[in-house]
Every structure is written in C-alpha cells, then in structure tokens.
Image (cartoon, coloured by chain):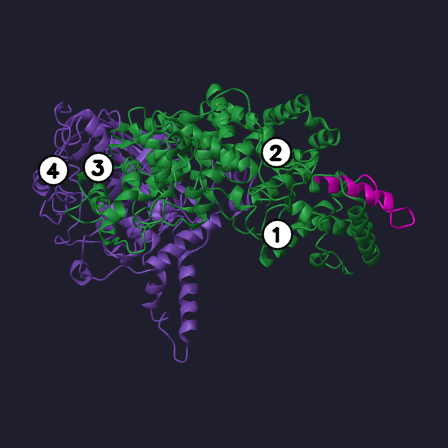
Amino acid sequence: MTIKPIIQCAAAQWRALLAALFTVLLVTVLPGCEPANTSAQEPPPVGGPLLLRRLTEAQYRATIAEIFGPDAPIVARFERGFRAEGLLAIGTSEAGISPFSIEQYSRAALSIADYVMQPDHRDRYLDCAALADGRFNSDCADQFIRHYGELLFRRPLTAAQRQRMLTIAQSGAEQLGDFDQGLKFALVGLLSSPEFLLRLERVKDNSKTITELDDYSKAERLAFFLTNAGPDQQLLEAAAGGELNSRQGLVKSVDRLLAGPQLEGAVRAFFSDMLQFDRFADVSKDADIYPAYSSQVAIDAQEQTLRDIVWLLVDQRGDYRDLFTLKQTHLTRALGIVYRQPVATRNGWQLTEFPETGVRAGIQSHIAFLALHAHPGRSSPTLRGKAIREIFLCQDVPDPPANVNFSLVQDDHNAAMPTARDRLVAHRTQPSCAGCHKIMDPPGLGLEQFDGLGTYRWRENGAVIDAGGDLDGLPYDDAAGLAQALHNHRETPRCLAENLYHYAVGRDTVWAERDYMDYLIAAFAKSGYRVDQLMRTIALSDNFFAIKTTGSDSNAAPTTALKPSAEPATMASDLPTPATGGSS
Amino acid sequence: MLSVNADSKIISMKITTLILCNTNRRRALACCALASAPLLAPLNSAAAALETPFWRDGKIDFVFSEFKFALATEMNVQDACPKGTSLNLAEIYAQTAAGKRQQNESEGDYGKRLQQAAAELAGQGEQNVCMSPEMAEPDPFFKTLASTTVTTEGIDLDGEISADDFTNGAGVAGIDNQFLRAVGCSRSYQPSGLSNGFSIEMLSGSWGILLALSEVDDLNNDDSVMVTFFANADPIQLSGKREPLGYATYAYDQDARFIAQTRGRIREGVLTTEPVDVRFHSVVNSMLTERPLHAARIEARLTETGELHGVLAGFTPVTELYDLQFGFRRGEKPRGTLAPEALRMHSANGAAFVLGYTCQGAYQALWRLADGEFDNTTGRYNAISTQYQFDAIPAFIVNAKTTSANQELVENGSAADDY
C-alpha cells in the first residue's frame, strides 16, 4: 500500500488503514490535514536499500545510441518489464532474467559489435589498428576496452576485467586472423556483462547506518534519472574527480543534464512508465465497433500524449496540473479520425487544439488513456476510474472479489439500462461491490462521453449520457469538469512527486520518508508545479543518494532477484565462441 | 435558418429509417417525405453541435466512399437484351467458319488461336480499333439496351419524359441515362458485372472525390447552400477491413480544373444542386485519366450520421468517356506524359476481350445514343447522359499542400513511372 504522509494526521484513521480501507477515503475525510513538513529544508536523509536494477529496454537503447550513435542496430526482442508498485522502474529490481533474455542480450550484443567493427564504421570508434606485422596490438585493444568499458560499465574497469577482455580480444584475433574481429568479441563481452546490463549500486562506507552511494553510482543514478541513459563522459569525469560530493559540483552536473536535450527522453520514459504504455501491447479493439483503431493509431496515441507532456513540461516549463486541462495537443491524421478533428499535415504531426467548446481536455481524455483503460468492445467507467485513482492520484483500489456477476454490466444493449451509469447501479448498491465502485465509478463515469476508443459521444443506446459526478468533494458536470477536478485535486501533484521519486530511486518510499515527501511536494508547489524543477530537487537532495545499510528496511547487499558477486564476472559461458571462417 | 429552442436541453431525435430515394427530382421530395420524418428536430446550437459533429459552422465536408455507374437495378438479360449480349473480337471470329473449333484441337490451343485472331482483327498501332475506333467498320455484334422495362436510379436531366428515359424502382419516370442504353447489353455492365464499379483504384488511393457544403443553416430545409466539388489530393483512409473511415482529413487538388462550385438546396433532407461542370481524376492500369461530367447535378439524401447517399448525373463528352472507360488513348504516366502506346493499346484491347465487347462497338454506340450538347455544325450530340450512384461520408477538407511520403520516388523517376 502506498504510504501517505496524511496518515499521521488523525489517530482515528489508523483503524481505517489497518482495515485496509482505501487511501482515497482518508483523503476524502481529511480535507484539512496538511503535510507535516512544508519547510524549504530537506529533512535528514533516510535512504533505502541498495538496489540492483536491470536496464529497461528504453535505457538500453538510449545508452547504446549515446555511446555508439543512433544508427547502431539492436537486433533483439526484449522481455516485457515487470510492474511493481505501479512502476516498471520498481519492477527492474524485483524481476529475474530469463534464459530467453540472456539469449536476446547476446544477440543484441553481437549486432551492435558487428556494426561497430565493420570496416566502414570502425574508424569512428577506433583510431588504431593491428601492428604492422599483423601481430595483436595490446595497447590499441586496451585503449578500446578501457574507453568503451568505462562508458558501458558506467565506471572504470578493474584490472581483472580489463585483462579478461584483453584475453578475449587476443584469442579472437588470433583464431580469426583479424584484429578487429578480436575486438568485436571483446565488445560482445562488455555488452553481455552484468556490469552493463544491471545497475549495480555501491556505497562509499558500509560501516555507517545511513551512508551514500559511491561517486560512480551517484553518476549512474543521476544519469538514468535525468537522461534515461548511462552517464556520459563528462559525468563520469565529474564522478572520478569527486565533484558529485560537493553541492556546487552536483548542482553543476544536474543543471547541465537538465538543460540538455536528453531531458525530453527522461520525461518521456517516466511518463511512459507511469501511464503504463507497455500495456498497449495487449490492447485489442473490435474492428466492427471501432473500425478506426489500428496499430498505427495505438502508436500515434502514445506518441500524442508524450508529445503533449514534453511540450507542456519541457518546452513550456509549464504547470504539471495543466496536463489535465490542456486543450493544445499534437495530432496525426490517423488520430484526427478518432477525435473527429481536421489535421492538415498529411505526413507527421500537427500542433492543434481540442475545440474550446468541447468537453475534451487533458491527457486523461486522450486515446492513450481512454482506449487503454477500456474493453475491446465497450468503454469501462470502472477501469478508467480505477486508473485515475491509481495512476494520477496514487490511491490503491483492491481487486474485485472472485464472485462478481458481470453479466449486467457487460450487456451494453440492455434497453432498460441504456447507459453504463444505469448498469453499474447494481455494483454501487450491492454491499460487496459498493466499497470500491463508489470510489472508482465517479471519475470513470466522468469519461463516459468518450467511447471505448476515445471518440466523443453524447448518447449511449439513445439515452443522453450523464457524465456528472464528484471527485473527493470536487463536483463536475462532464469530462471538462472532471479535468478541472483532477487539476485541482490536492493529491494530483503529490502523486506525481511520489511517482517521480519512486521512479528515480527504483523503490517505494519507506515510512520514515514521509517528511522527505512533504519536502518534495512543498518544493514542487513552490516551483509552480514544474516537473523539471521537481527532478532537480530530487537529484540535489541528500536522500536521493542515501543508502540505509542496516536495520529492518534495508540490506547492505544490493536487493534484487539476482545477487551478483563482489567482483561481477563477465558471463563468459554466454559469450559466443570465436569461430574461424568469417564473422557471425 | 436553424430553429433555436433555448429551453431545450435534451433533444429528442425524430429520425426514422431513411430510405435512399434516387428518383426523379419532381417526385423525389414526396418519396422521401414518405421515407422519413425531419432529420433533426429543432435544436439549440450547443445540442446541434453535439448531435451532428459533421456539421460545423455551417459546413459539411464529405469524401466519396462509393462511386459507380447507375446501371440497371436488376435485369433479366434474356428479356432486356432479346438479341443477346455484345461480343468481343474473339467471339466474333468464333462465329466464322474459320473460327470454329477444329477436330482434335485442344481447348487451350483453340483459345490461343482465337486470341491470335482477335489481335489480328484489332490491328496494331494507330490502326488498332481501340486506338482509332472512328476508322473501324460498324460492329453489328455490339448490342445496346432497348428495353423499356429495365429500372435504374437517377435524375431527370432534361425535364422531359421521353421514350428512351428510364423509370426507377418506385415508378418515377424521366431518368436520362443513355450511357446505360449503350452498355446495358454488354455482359460486364449487368447488375453484377465486372464494370459495375471502379472503386478499387479509389480505395487504393489513386483518386478520390470530395464534396463540401457550406452556408448550411438547416440540415432538413435550406433554400440555398454552397456546393463545391474537389478532386481528392490524398489517399482515402480505410479501416483494417478496407472500409472508408469517416472524419478523415483530405487536401484537395489545387488544379482549378478539378474544382467546381454551384449552389443547391435541401428539402426534407434531400440535397439537390444546380448544374455545374465537374472533373475528377481516374486511374486505369496505373494510367491517369480524367472523368468529366458536364451540367452535373446531385440528388442525394443526408442521413442523421452525416452520410450522403444519392446520384451525381450529367453529360459526359463522348470522346472523353470513350477514352476514360474503353480506349485509354490519353492515359498518362504519373509525371503527366503520355503512357506508352503498348500499355494503352493492350489495356484497351485486354479490357474489351475480358469484358465482352469491341472498342469500336462501344465507340459507335456512345455516339449513336448521345443526347447532350447538340452541335449545330455537325448536327449531332457531343455528350451522353451519364448517371453515377455515390455514397459519401463525413470528412474534413483542407486547403493544404500535400505530398506522399513516397513523393521523392516519383520525383526521382521511379520504376513505376517506367512501368
């Protein structure tokens, strides 16, 4: 369950919490409860456990593009991410790696190394070659391994790691009679190593209860949070020089990363995760009911929402809450068909606006939200309401009981109950269902003016749709009113701050971090709810790098399904064996 | 004008099942009045916008989703064509003594011999009957439709009921469709024949038709609306089932020859327009042609979902109709130059062979049955009445420069240009 600072407000609410009532109820009945810590000073760091996190597909791709260029091919299928506590970012430290993934990582490594060492490309990456007499050039190989090893491992290679890669390179070069081919297999080794595929965080001083990450782990955490890729050469140099230990040095690096073009990638990655876009792989729509839905619409829909987010939060440095009332949007012609809006641009994107007089506004009225949280052949106030509660307000909604009778709700041609509101009455009145449905349905019904794909409709089965409701004391008449209610809801910015912090550190908050969360939220509000400023606050906070090495909440060893050894070894058994007679 | 009821918050739609009434204009209103109540009850403006998303600021844009010749609604060929149907050159040759199948001649060999004979009869180059039908002998085997019992949907273009006119399924007479008379006894122009429609190229994005209504104050009754025809410059947007999607955006062809404007009126949901010359693109075998229609008029019903079903009718210059439908003599490459003669000639001869007629027979019939644009100098009509049935769905028409994502291939001279 998500921990809310608000919990500390009233002892009476403890009973509700212990009874596993929903956080939303607490919010609803405690409108006047203010955060305990709204000071501008960060509370003492609490820290969390050391983590071992697997690179996401987006991080893998961004890192490879950063190091070897955007054209470097990655020929592999990545395993789906595991979502925990609402975020894939948290799941990266909880899921194991299957044999299939190892195989695919190996394929990806081969495709990248093959590209890098092709005669047409190698000079971009290597300015030396085999010795004149054809003998193995150890200095050249060592230079290559040290440079790319540091970028890939996000810290300098140890002597043992360097020697191991050198041995692979020399063995490959001798067996294949080609210096570059030998280096190719050394690069495959680097790309297949746990040091590259996993984020292995290390602490400076394991003897303290609350300590902090070492310099390179700091650089790694900063880079993935602010750029969604590994640290660049400049950040690694800052780490090597100890600059990240001083406030001034840290500010310099954080501000440099926030000012760079990769901030967009970081914002995109976070919101893709938060908005659960990975689930689009499972979305299907009935072609007879929603003929406009296609794989292109699914792709464009996600991109639309991400473009709008980047436009408002990065380009305009706007207020996060305005995402819920935003009229400006980016459309393609494929999306224009669903939204019933003209799009003059035939190929590509056009910045336009939803009609001022219409009810559509904000990302919760986008196809990417409405179609994702709906059924293949009909809308779903329940799924949409649940998603609003969980994604935008961080309020947990339990799974339904096993014996729910869905037959009435699924009968969307019921003449006596033409609208979803009518059909859901049963669930809102039966005691076993009402608890959750009274929480989920109001915001979901507020979006009933959009069908299961996202096209506006005024009627369902001939009856005018009533989209009015109340969101935790904020009444609304239609989807536009719901957008304003979400904008004004006190949990909206708080939830974003929680999600962003969880995303940054790869874990849920612990109990003792409630003051820190209040500090973040206060800073977020003070900045005008600017997400880039919230990212800066997090990145500059002591708690961001803090690690609790002992005690009940933490463990000195990295926490994950995978437990690396103290000196991670390259997965030599998974490396391809150099074969004579040509490259693989 | 729009009737406004400010107190009306909830509108009760009074729409009954709409029946397509492609009838004589003088009878159309009565017919359609029987078929439906008013499209929309009086609405306040906000409610109207919600109920009719296709109608914005007095404008309604459409893209044609179906476009085909208005042929016989249904037809018993033996009754309608008592002298039989038209023959192609191979079939004509087969009726001669030399064209009979010989003993021990396999079916395959016989077929090849007939094709070879047909090719010899057709001639080559400028002497080919499809390339120069005016030079060919009259084709006695080409049959035209003389029946007075065949029904078809369409418009009375001349305001007169004459012997050649057709009657529609509801008994409304006076429909001028001499093109149907010309091709009605050719087997591919039967109700289920291959030439019944030509939407394959339209649905593949090769051409399209846009229609814009503006100054629309009332969807049921409006004495004056602006009607603009455009050629579509963008490919039509389809669903996964290859069905046209409503509310897609299209840019129109900026060439003024493909833009035509007239006025019209809406009476009880039926749009009728004043005559105007229109011109659209057409594509056959990757060759670009043009489809003109003079004094074109629309009679079509607007549905509550913003669709338009009806007839576009007018007069097609005979020579151009022959070229776009039978001879392809002016077929062009994508870059506007004349397509190779071999492509044009073989396309025309191949179509005649497969579809069962001769080029010269079609050419001669079109001229013989022409009924529009009388030429005092020659003493003959230069155009023939032509009726098209169409369906149109809501769209957005924009004035924008538009190019294909593959435009670079065209500009650089692609294989497609060289066939």
Q: Which residues are magenta?
A: A127-151
Q: Quadrant of the N terminus of chain A?
A: top left
- A406 versus A208 height, above or below: below
Asked if A441 appears above or below A534 in the picture, the reply is below
Is A142 contained in the magenta span? yes
Whole-percent x and y of residue B132?
Answer: 39, 48
Q: Chain of mark 4?
A: B
Q: Which chain is green?
A: A
Residue B120 at x, y = what percent? 43, 60
Q: Under tag 4, what secondary structure?
A: loop
Residue B205 picture quarter: top left
Q: Which mark is residue B14?
A: 4
Q: CA distance from mark 2 to mark 3?
A: 51 Å
Tell me the residue that label 3 is attached to: A465
Do dots 1 and 2 share one subunit?
A: yes
Three-letter code for the amino acid on which mark 4 is drawn: Lys
Q: Nearer the viewer, residue A218 or B369?
A: A218
On what subunit does the disc labeled 3 rest? A
At label 2, counting other C-alpha atoms closer than 10 Å, the crowd grade (few under 14, some 14-19, many 20 or more) is many
Question: Do marks 2 and 3 both belong to one polypeptide chain?
Answer: yes
- Chain shown in purple: B
Q: Chain of mark 1?
A: A
- Locate residue A13: give its quadrant: top left
Q: In the orientation shown, which residue stands out farthest toward the bottom?
A: B104
Disc 1 is placed on an element classified as loop
Type of amino acid under label 3:
Ile
Q: Nearer the viewer, mark 3 or mark 1?
A: 1
Q: Relative to B218, is B250 on the left or the right?
A: right
* Near-viewer residue (A287 or A500): A500
| Alpha carbons under labels 3 and 1: distance apart | 51 Å
